[in-house]
Amino acid sequence: MKRAIALSVVIAALALISLPVLGATTLEVVWMGWPKNLVDAQIEGFRKAYPDIPVDIQLVPFNQLFQTLEVRLASGHAPDVFIVDGPLTASYATRGYLLPLDDVFTETELAAWFPSSVAACRWNGRLYAAPYATSSVGLYFNKTIFRKYGVALPSENPGERLTWEQAAELARKLTIDENHDGQPDTWGLILEQSDRPYQILPLAESRGARALSADGAVSEGYITSPAFIEAATFYSKLFNEWKVSPKGLLEAPVAREYFGCGKAAMMLGAEWNISRLAAFKDWEFGLAPHPYFAGGRAVTPTGGWNVGIGSRTANRDAAVRFLKFITGRDASIAWTKLFGNAPARRDVYAALPDVFKNPMWQVLLHEMDTTASPRPVTPGYLQYESILKDAFNAIQFGADPASTLESAARQIDRDLAKYR
């Protein structure tokens, strides 16, 4: 199955490469597969401001985006502009795929973004991308379900967080098999990205573990540390011992649909759900701060999307104009209104007080200020993430956490060796 999926991605990528040339100055942009009508609405201003720069924007679904870019970038047929997952900036920069941008932005312009977002765009002291969006995660809960079963609601006050042990106890109370057929009709807890390091690593960090060596080159002794294995064992118990989380719910939109339709009492999910859950009118939702392990520290995921320019672009000036537009204040405001991502620009929060005074946003803004921890920086992040994702997936389906992580560490360190 993986080989078939990989082949389909290669075919899709090559199909994009073979698209007819639309014009000498047509700007080719590879972008996340967000709804086309929303993306078109966001870049409408660019098309009006620069009618002489046609934009061919190619929307690629999330699960195919990284493999598609790998094929395009390695083939030498890179797009002029492309969206960059934050942790992959170092990988693309190391391999010479990104145009350095140190002369594109002034220090005053860079100050518009969160410093952590700008830091995620640098590698070896040079700027290779511009921040587009950041992110945070909290514990959504269905107030209607909690009240139906007489369970006290979690606090929605920023900083007043459950421990993971308390969250697991709530999940056990709220995993309900109404018709006694052996299958829960309501699950206690689902994870929006149930096998992705983005959401799982903060559990280990809350236990005191590190996800990778400081130089980004070694995982042995980090993902195999006692603290990391303890967190992975807790993760395994959610699916296999306590059976409060459904196995195989791997796609974020499906997880959100589960939660939104009342099939789960709690969901560990990102900020974009604030606007999307509004579509589910039959339920009342709340958002509690991200849990932490008793005796540990509060840690929440963060990081987001950057935007880069292909190092071989023949349309540098047009690409810079597009980059500055799409990461600028007005386009960021438009995207926040259209889609609900957390903007990486600080001035957008000041421009949209009615959006960010929402109590759910207040919880997440507190997390972004106090507990946010980005994913590890390494030029081999794509391999690191892929191997660790497979390990989490195996643990979710019952594999032994310690031996699975030991095997993953050996694979990761073999792949990272070429970067030492």
Image (cartoon, rainbow, N blue to C red):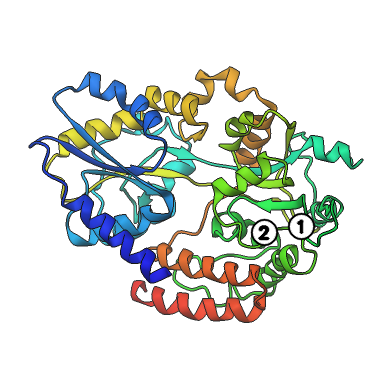
Q: Nearer the viewer, residue 340 or 40?
A: 40
In the figure, is residue 219 to the left or right of 102? right
Q: Quadrant of residue 177?
A: bottom right
Decide if residue 91 is on the left or right side of residue 171. left
The vertical placement of 212 against 167, above or below, is: below
Q: Amino acid at mark 2?
A: Leu
For image coordinates 52% across by 31% down, the residue present is 340
Of residues 43 and 114, the one nearer the viewer is 43
Image location of residue 317, percent across then percent down: 16, 34
* Residue for point 30% across, 55% down: 69
* Residue farthest along the right direction in this orientation: 150
C-alpha gap between disc 2 and disc 1: 8 Å
Residue 301 appears in view: no
- Residue 293 is tagged as 1
The disc label shown at residue 383, or none? none
236 lies above or below 118: below
- On screen, residue 209 versus residue 60, left or right, reads right
Q: Where does residue 285 sit, x and y in percent of width and height?
A: 73, 34
Is there any visible trace of residue 285 in the rendered image? Answer: yes
Q: Badges 2 and 1: C-beta atoms under 8 Å apart?
A: yes
Quadrant holding the C terminus: bottom left
> Which residue matches tag 2?
203
Q: Earlier in the sequence, mark 2 or mark 1?
A: 2
Q: Which residue is at a point 50% across and 65% down the rendered structure image?
A: 214
